[in-house]
Amino acid sequence: MINFLKNITFIIVSYKSENIIENCIKSVNSISKILVVENSTNKFIKKDLEKKYSNVEVIVAGKNLGYACANNLAINLVKTKYAFILNPDTYFKEEALKQIYLAIQFLKEDFTLLGPGIVNTNTIMTNNFDEKNFVQKTSYIKGFAIFVNMNKIDFSPFFDENFFLFLEEIDLCKRVIDFGGKIYLVNKCNIYHDAKKSSFNNLEIEKCRNWHWMWSLFYYNKKHYGNFVAYRVTITKFISSLIKFIFGYIFFKKKYSLIHKSRIEGLINAYFNKPSWRRPHE
């Protein structure tokens, strides 16, 4: 088990997540290396975390690179056999890593990605398994916890950097499957995920999230299934957001209206093949 832990590099991409990232770091053993990519100009987090934890290295990006680009930056520095990509708002107990270790032995290293079979989000537990199953083959796993067999990655870059936020991991899983890779959920691997606690939950962030959700939805479908499918998937969402924007404007629901305006703008940018340029204000 010790050799297994030495062969894992944990990757945590943060955006001003000082308030919660230490819970994640503390749940990781002190044997494994941890690479933190801070998607801002905050040099204090580097000084603070590297002083507190000898196994932590912090890379201050200097700007918000997004989930895909920041994770690629760290992935390219990994020297170990495995990488474990985590959101800063996740944490787990030692038993979770034991279950991953057992799954690797069971699969005889024949996997590309592994994900948790049990997710505890804000105290709500979901279990995707019949108790008789140890692992379950799947077509995708969520991006907050991705265990990577570095020897099985046959393409570059790891994440598509055209995505800034949302669907990067779904795109990754699609490419893994297309390249003949295998993805599994690991039963009894329990990951705690406090969704949205890793960044400020304010109007500007919500507008940015909604802009990128719509942009990414169109781009993902266009990339893998073509223009017709991408328009078919998104056009009803465009109309719905337009109606909600007008409703919010008429009835003075400013926040509601602005969020749906951001959705419309994200889709229009995608329709005109513009890149995912929008960033939250620093």
Image (tube, rainbow, N blue to C red):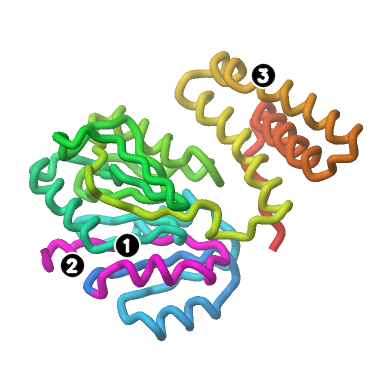
Q: Position of residue 75 (x, y in %)?
A: 35, 56
Toward which corner of the image does residue 275 lie, by quadrant?
top right
* Res 6 label: 2
Q: Secondary structure at mark 2?
A: helix
Residue at 47% across / 56% down in the picture?
A: 70
Distance, label 1 to label 2, CA atoms, is 11 Å
131 and 85: which is toward the camera: 131
Distance, label 1 to label 3, CA atoms, is 40 Å
To which residue does mark 1 refer?
10
Position of 65 with respect to 183 (left or right) is: right
* Residue type of the residue flagged with mark 1: Phe
Residue 7 part of the magenta segment:
yes
Toward which corner of the image does residue 232 lie, by quadrant?
top right
Q: Is residue 207 above or below residue 21?
A: above
* Residue type of the residue flagged with mark 2: Lys
Q: Position of residue 74 (x, y in %)?
A: 39, 60
Q: Which residues are magenta?
A: 1-30
Position of 60 with respect to 246 (left or right) is: left
Which callout, 1 or 3, points at the residue further toward the start of the chain?
1
Q: Secondary structure at mark 1?
A: strand
Residue 155 part of the magenta segment:
no
Q: Position of residue 16 (x, y in %)?
A: 57, 66
Which callout, 2 or 3, points at the residue further toward the start of the chain?
2
* Residue type of the residue flagged with mark 3: Thr
Residue at 18% across / 67% down in the picture?
A: 6
